């Protein structure tokens, strides 16, 4: 039986079975009258509130057990929700990894012009090859060393004004 595998249901059934057993035992042995007789024999102990105290403790324990059971059920729902989210994220990650393009192996590159030979035998520019094999995009610019070399013969002012004109 699948519902007996759930601990809260099993615990409630055990509690009901135990309560039924106590009820049958009390009908057979009449512990209440024995308890009352014991209280009257020890009247100087002031145990007349024992029954009320016991009943209050039992109700408090029942209320605490019920509240704790609800908390555990909520934690179980949260755990299952987190597990489902984890599985969904794992699927998304797997799909993303499948879509991810990677470059592997050896590339044949021209020493002079830096073109790369693709699988079809065509020589294509390095930037175009990398863009076709990945999600990378290229933007042109000069590193500081190349900029000094490029603008060396033109003078500092000419290169500066040329750069400003290009931006406009």
Image (cartoon, rainbow, N blue to C red):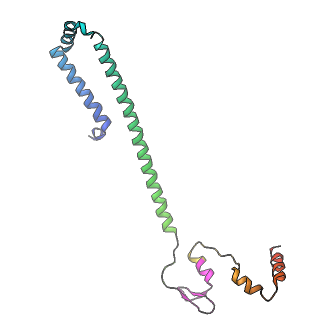
Q: Is residue 100 left or right of residue 160?
A: left
Seen from this angle, which residue lies furthest left? 29
Residue 47 horizontal/vertical position (percent): 27, 11
- Against 142, residue 100 (above or below) is above
Identity of the residue drawn at 21% across and 6% down: 40
Seen from this angle, which residue lies furthest bottom? 112
Quadrant (top left, top right, bottom left, bottom right) of the C terminus: bottom right
Q: Nearer the viewer, residue 88 or 54?
A: 54
Segment tinted magenta in the rendering:
107-130
Residue 156 horizontal/vertical position (percent): 81, 82
Q: Nearer the viewer, residue 82 or 141?
A: 141
- Against 48, residue 112 (above or below) is below
Residue 37 colored in magenta in the image: no
When asked about the image quadrant of residue 57, the answer is: top left
- Against 87, residue 23 (above or below) is above
When asked about the image quadrant of residue 125, the answer is: bottom right
- Against 125, residue 26 (above or below) is above
Quadrant (top left, top right, bottom left, bottom right) of the N terminus: top left
Identity of the residue drawn at 25% across and 10% down: 45
Give the mark count.
0
Residue 44 horizontal/vertical position (percent): 24, 7
Identity of the residue drawn at 19% across and 17% down: 26
Residue 81 horizontal/vertical position (percent): 44, 46
């Amino acid at each position: 039986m699948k519902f007996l595998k759930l601990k809260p249901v099993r615990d409630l059934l055990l509690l009901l079975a135990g309560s039924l057993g106590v009820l049958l035992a009390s009908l057979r042995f009449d512990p209440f009258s024995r308890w009352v007789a014991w209280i009257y024999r020890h009247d100087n102990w002031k145990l007349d509130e024992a029954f009320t105290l016991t009943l209050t403790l039992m109700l408090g324990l029942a209320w605490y057990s019920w509240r704790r059971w609800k908390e555990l059920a909520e934690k179980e729902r949260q755990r299952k929700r987190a597990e489902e989210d984890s599985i969904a994220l794992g699927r998304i990650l797997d799909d993303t990894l499948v879509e991810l393009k990677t470059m592997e192996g050896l590339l044949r590159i021209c020493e002079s012009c830096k073109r790369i030979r693709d699988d079809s035998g065509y020589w294509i520019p390095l930037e175009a090859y990398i863009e076709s094999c990945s999600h990378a995009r290229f933007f042109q610019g000069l590193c500081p060393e190349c900029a000094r070399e490029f603008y060396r013969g033109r003078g500092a002012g000419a290169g500066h004004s040329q750069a400003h004109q290009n931006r406009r």
